Image (cartoon, grey):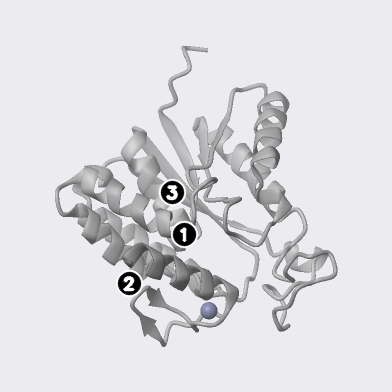
Amino acid sequence: MRGAIHRNALVLFSGGQDSTTCLAHALAQYAHVETLAFDYRQRHVVELTARMEVLAQIRATFAQWAGKLGEDHLLDLGVLGQVSETSLTRDMAFQMEQSGLPNTFVPGRNLLFLTLAASLAYRRNLDVIVTGVCETDFSGYPDCRDDTMKAMQIALSLGMDRRLLIETPLMWIDKAQTWQLAHDLGERAWVGGGDKLVDLIVQHTHTCYLGNREHRHAWGFGCGTCPACDLRAKGWLRWKR
Ligand code: ZN
């Protein structure tokens, strides 16, 4: 293995605020970046449409990133609907379960995502997987925690006999800091790019669990009341203050 310099990244890119910020981070950092999403018949399938628009907008707005942005991958994970019954894949109301986790939680979903991402990264010769998981202000999904990420990094590197890095730029920051990070990354690309990237995220990314694209708020589109909208809105307000 030649040194420890990582050059190519695969970004888990759903088309939301977090994964778009991760994509900008990867484009600022690496020579070649590919993107990956999973279609598991989620209720917010509108995200999958939004992500194509985000990619197009990034190519159009950030010329120096456009050349690094490579292939986009979409894997069909409809099988998730067969093994889980949650409010993201079925028509159920959001609520907290006895386990203390919200019923948006698909057990082990992120472990599956990372394993498939690692298989793809291996085939595509990409040595970094970038994911927007976060311990700070999310709902406490155990498969998004830092220890889980480190364990997965080791397991996948061993199991594929190739050094793989799982990078989590948002792990220890909150939603207000995520807006700031996007601004910093855009500004570093070109003067004025900070506001452009924030505008792009507000207008084109999708976070709302209910797939609502009718109501436009200062922080973007969404129903305004689901847990994802609530988190995004509060982060925006704290950042703007
Ligand atoms: Zn919502």
Q: Secondary structure at mark 2?
A: helix
Q: Earlier in the sequence, mark 1 or mark 2?
A: 1
Q: Residue at x 69, y 36 (%)?
A: 152
Amino acid at circle 3: Cys
Q: Nearer the viewer, residue 160 or 221?
A: 221
Q: Are circles 3 and 1 on residues that touch, CB within 8 Å?
A: no
Indicate the quadrant where residue 164 lies: top right
For ligand 1, tell me if the residue under mark 2 lies within 8 Å.
no
* In this view, 116 is above or below 75: above
Amino acid at circle 1: Lys
Callout 1 environment at 10 Å: few (<14), some (14 to 19), or many (20+)? many
Callout 2 environment at 10 Å: few (<14), some (14 to 19), or many (20+)? some
* In this view, 148 is above or below 221: above
- The image shows residue 173 at horizontal and vertical percentages of 49, 49
* Residue at the far bottom in the pictured view: 214
Q: Earlier in the sequence, mark 2 or mark 3?
A: 3
Give the residue pinned by disc 1: 175
For ligand 1, tell me if the residue under mark 1 lies within 8 Å.
no
Give the residue pinned by disc 3: 22
Alpha carbons under labels 3 and 1: distance apart: 13 Å
Amino acid at circle 2: Gln
Q: Residue at x 49, y 82 (%)?
A: 224
Q: Which mark is residue 203?
A: 2
